Amino acid sequence: MSYSKELETALLAVQRATLLTKSVYSSHAKGTLSKSDSSPVTIGDFGAQALIISSIKHAFPEDEIVGEEDADDLRKDSKMRDMIWDLVQKAKLEDEEAETKIGGPIKSVDDMLNAIDSGNSAGGRKGRTWALDPIDGTKGFLRGGQYAVCLGLLVDGVPTVGVIGCPNLPVDDDAPMDQSIGFDADDKEGKGVLFGAVKGEGATSRPLSRGALQEGKKISMKAVDDISQATFCESVEAGHSSHGDNAAIASKLGITKPSVRMDSQAKYCSVARGAGDIILRLPVKATYEEKIWDHAAGVVIVREAGGEVADVNGKPLDFGVGRTLKENKGVVTAPKAVLPHVIEAVKDVLAAKL
Ligand SMILES: Nc1ncnc2c1ncn2[C@@H]1O[C@H](COP(=O)(O)O)[C@@H](O)[C@H]1OP(=O)(O)O
Ligand SMILES: [Mg+2]
Ligand SMILES: [Mg+2]
Ligand SMILES: [Mg+2]
């Protein structure tokens, strides 16, 4: 079946939400709270989740949504709630037809809180579920590095549509990855990319705009003939992916170039357009369960660009078991043809640690 309405809705919804996140960054008042797992959340995360869920509910009222955030803290904190309401009202696409397609503005504070809380689906194997990360890489966002607004559609547990907005990546698909770091607070030309993909239909990139969608261009991964020449990427945060294990794996593959460190699913987008080749996310703690919203959209984009993902044991990622990837450990991404080779190196390095 065709997913053209799903793709268009997701592209517009993510594009509108990126406008909100950019306005938070420029305002320098990010209203940061610490969550129960001590990770940060800002008014940008809440505002983007409200806008995107209201867009999905307008176009597809029956669909389930697994969103990272909930509104519990906001129901207790009127100051924070008012800051977010102000942002949400201001974030509008400058194209009436586009804005109408995603339902127009949210009507009240209650609707905004209820939208945020509609991201409470338990996920699962049956039906249509959107996986939403309103700001992926919140630490990167706060640092002025890369971050991404990520929305994926799972159909019976299978990642099927993926859209990611990266306000700080260069528009040029051929820009080298080390030029990708740095924040575009002033909305300069040349920064801000919207990636999209539908299973079986390829992946595209287009410049983020403030109104109607710009035209998309096909993207694809680079062929890797000699793995020792590959570029690998990993998290900036050592607490999110084991830099030591990643380095040992790279060395086993004969890779001598230093890793490129980048926050968020901007990594998936970068390798999907050939600005890097391999992503290593080796677990730091055995108990950590990767969240479906941290991978669903990126996985569709990478696969449609010629890549494949698996966990550290080479097992396919199972998005149908709830809000987390609890049947998997870590995530490894590479061009399809070389993934088995990379997984062998991962297994060797992990086995040597036992
Ligand atoms: N202990 C952890 N291990 C792995 N990932 C984590 C951990 N804590 C938070 N994350 C999530 O990792 C992702 C960031 O990955 P990266 O380090 O590659 O940028 C984010 O989704 C972040 O959540 P969040 O969406 O709240 O930022
Ligand atoms: Mg978070
Ligand atoms: Mg995330
Ligand atoms: Mg997040």
Image: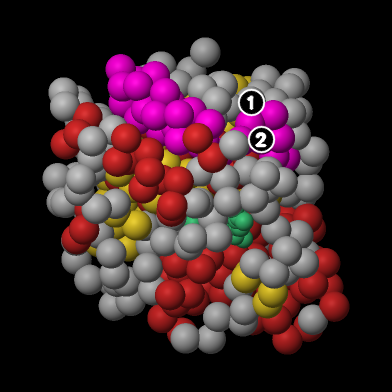
Determine crowd level at label 1: few under 14, some 14-19, many 20+ residues with C-alpha closer than 10 A.
many
Q: Pick the quarter of the image with the C terminus.
A: top right
Quick one: SS at disc 2? loop
CA distance for labels 2 and 1: 6 Å
Asked whether residue 159 appears in the rendered view, the answer is: no
Q: What's the residue type where badge 2 is placed?
A: Leu
Span shown in magenta: 323-351
**Residue 255, horizontal then vertical, whole percent:** 23, 40
Tell me what residue is drawn at x 20 percent, y 48 percent: 257
Q: In the rendered structure, which disc, 2 or 1, sits on the residue that comes first in sequence?
A: 1
Name the residue nearer the viewer: 336 or 347: 347
Name the residue nearer the viewer: 125 or 335: 335
Question: Assess mark 2: CB under 8 A from ligand 1?
Answer: no
Q: Compared with residue 193, is residue 168 higher up or lower down, i.e. above or below?
A: below
Q: What's the residue type where badge 1 is placed?
A: Asp
Quick one: SS at disc 1? loop
The reply, left or right, for residue 15 in relation to residue 115 is: left
Tell me what residue is drawn at x 42 percent, y 61 percent: 236
Residue that mark 2 sits on: 325
Q: Compared with residue 265, is residue 72 higher up or lower down, i.e. above or below?
A: below
Asked whether residue 327 appears in the rendered view, the answer is: yes
Magenta-drawn stretch contains 324: yes
The reply, left or right, for residue 13 in relation to residue 292 is: left
Residue that mark 1 sits on: 318
**Residue 231, horizontal then vertical, whole percent:** 24, 42
The figure's colour scheme reads: secondary structure
Magenta-drawn stretch contains 156: no
Tell me what residue is drawn at x 38 percent, y 43 percent: 248
- The answer to whether the residue labelled 2 contacts the one labelled 1, judged by CB atoms less than 8 Å apart, is yes
